[in-house]
Amino acid sequence: MPLALWGILGWSFAGSWALYVVAHVAMVLAGLGIGALLAIITTNYRLASSLGAFYAAPALAFSGITFPLFAMPLIAQYWAHTIPATAFLRLQVEQGLRGASVTTSMPELMILVGFASISFLLCVLLLPRKAINPNNFGKL
C-alpha cells in the first residue's frame, strides 16, 4: 500500500523515508516474533495460528486509524496497545502524511523495536525448554 500511495499514485511523502523503512522492518520482525512465540508456547501450529488471528484480527479497527482510540472502551484501548500495528500505523501517519520530525516518531519506533526484541528474547528463552520435552517432539 505505501508503494501504491507514494510510488505509483505519486503522493508526496512528508517525513523521513529512513525512519519509515526501519519501522517497517521492525513491524515485520515484531509480527514474526509474536507468531514464533505463540508457536513455541502452544507447540501446536493450528492453535498458534488461531490465537494469532484472534490477537491480530482487530489490529486495524483498534489502531485508532479507522476510529479514534480515545473514544473506544477501555478494554479496546488496552488491546490496541498490545498490538504492534497500532504503533506502526501511528508512525506511518506521522511520517507519511504529517511530516513529523524523527524525534516525534521515535516512541512508536521504540515500541516496535520493543515488541520485536521482547518476543524474540522470550522465544530464545522458551525454545530450549520446549525442544527437549519429548511430548513436543515433531510439534515445533
Image (cartoon, rainbow, N blue to C red):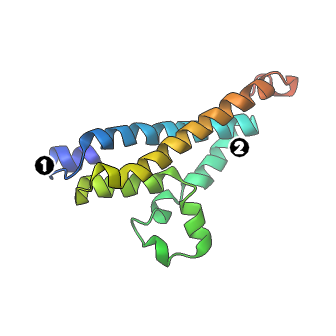
Q: Is 140 on the left-hand or right-hand side of 104?
A: right
From the viewer's perspective, is residue 108 above or below residue 23?
below
Residue toward you, 108 or 92: 108
Give SS at disc 2.
helix
Question: Which residue shows up at 24% across the image and 58% down it?
Answer: 97
Q: Is 116 on the left-hand or right-hand side of 103?
A: right
Question: Which residue shows up at 58% across the image and 55% down it?
Answer: 82
Question: Which residue shows up at 75% across the image and 34% down it?
Answer: 43
Give SS at disc 1.
loop
What residue does disc 2 label?
47
Question: Which residue shows up at 42% across the image and 72% down it?
Answer: 67
Occupied quadrant, residue 20: top left
What residue does disc 1 label?
10
- Give me the C-alpha separation between circle 2 and circle 1: 42 Å
From the viewer's perspective, is residue 25 above or below residue 81?
above
Does any portion of residue 123 appear in the rendered image? yes
In the image, what residue type sits under mark 2? Leu
From the viewer's perspective, is residue 65 above or below residue 112?
below
In the image, what residue type sits under mark 1? Gly
Q: Is 91 on the left-hand or right-hand side of 3?
A: right
- Residue 46 in the image: state x and y as whole percent: 68, 40
